[in-house]
Amino acid sequence: MRACRREPVPHTPVWFMRQAGRSLPEYRKAREGIPMLDSCFMPELVAEITMQPVRRYGVDAAVFFSDIVTPLKAIGLDLEIKPGVGPVIAEPVRAAADLDRLRAPEPDELAPIAAAVRLLTAELGATPLIGFGGAPFTLASYLIEGGPSKGFEHTKAMMYGDPQLFTALLDRVADITSTFLLTQIDAGASAIQLFDSWVGSVAPVDYRQYVQPASAKVFAAVADRGVPRIHFGVGTGELLRDLGEAGADVVGVDWRVPLHEAERRVGPGKALQGNLDPATLFAPPAALDAAVQRVLDDAARLPGHVFNLGHGVPPNADPGQLARVVDYVHENTVRS
């Protein structure tokens, strides 16, 4: 939390996106036979999975185990997460009438989420819990496309061809995500991260016109809670300043942009998070150490830095390599 607020720290903190997930054998055992979205509504299971990497690695923060489509499931949308595919929406949003199916979740619909957060904060003690939510553009792209997409043809066709419907959809999704994040914060989460996995597909001019207002609405909705707000997207090198200007306190940087350059692009007043290439986890230990050190060297003069990968932990990563990264960062960034 101190690093997020650009305050002095005893060592560089480290956590990993998707640290609670498929790379851990204990995760696979805990979730055996349980569909992904079902597991997100089981408080004891959510708490167990969230805690697994904290116990194993000694990371400086836990990240809430969930999925960006969890609040969409909570309001009754017909969707599932298909193994090897991702979220699949039975009835995509393609017309104004489809917006009637979208509304902010009621408290009872998110009661299992709040219960899981309370279980976690009781067990975590001083270790922060990072809340989790999907940014409006990425969630809207799933709703429009009906599932994952490479070209986002339907999404961009709506954005350019019916901008009024597109912005109305993103505004509606912003309310859904805001409610999801507020539920986690009010139950005890110490910070939140807004994931915009697919926003790197959007040009800066289109981001500012069509996308940024909805993300800004989410950050504004949680601003009075006083928790650090992290914003992360993939392939967003050209959007880094815009991401920060949407309202984040911390901007996540993927591995494509060095942190010193990211600092220049983001501008003053923001902490940075990142940005080790996840593929380095498959390199020999000495090469992994060298890659970690390059990130640390690049971040040495930053007033606020949270070490992380430049994207999520790959499902086939060796947990031993992640433990090595945590130990290396902690041991080599101790402040005197």
Image (cartoon, rainbow, N blue to C red):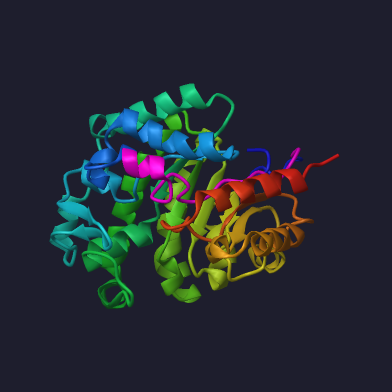
Q: How many labels does the image show?
A: 0
Q: Is residue 187 visible?
A: no
- Residue 108: quadrant of the picture: top left
Is 26 inside the magenta-drawn segment?
A: yes
For residue 9, side relative to residue 310 (left or right): right
Q: Is residue 251 above or below residue 2?
A: below
For residue 297, side relative to residue 209 (left or right): right
Which is more toward the observer, 65 or 205? Answer: 65
Is 296 inside the magenta-drawn segment?
A: no
Name the residue rendered at 40%, 24% in the picture. 119
Name the residue rendered at 17%, 49% in the picture. 77
Q: In this view, does 177 lie above or below 183?
A: below
Name the residue rendered at 76%, 60% in the picture. 297
Q: Is residue 42 visible?
A: yes
Name the residue rendered at 33%, 28% in the picture. 44
Residue 42 percent coordinates (x, y): 28, 32
Which is more toward the observer, 274 or 160? Answer: 274
Q: Quick one: quadrant of the N terminus?
A: top right
Residue 128 percent coordinates (x, y): 55, 33
- Residue 76: quadrant of the picture: top left
Residue 91 percent coordinates (x, y): 13, 60
Q: Quick one: quadrant of the C terminus?
A: top right
Residue 90 percent coordinates (x, y): 14, 59
For residue 242, side relative to residue 293 (left or right): left
For residue 279, side relative to residue 150 (left or right): right
Q: In this view, does 263 lie above or below 163?
A: above
**The magenta segment:** 9-29
Which SS does the magenta portion mostly show?
Answer: loop
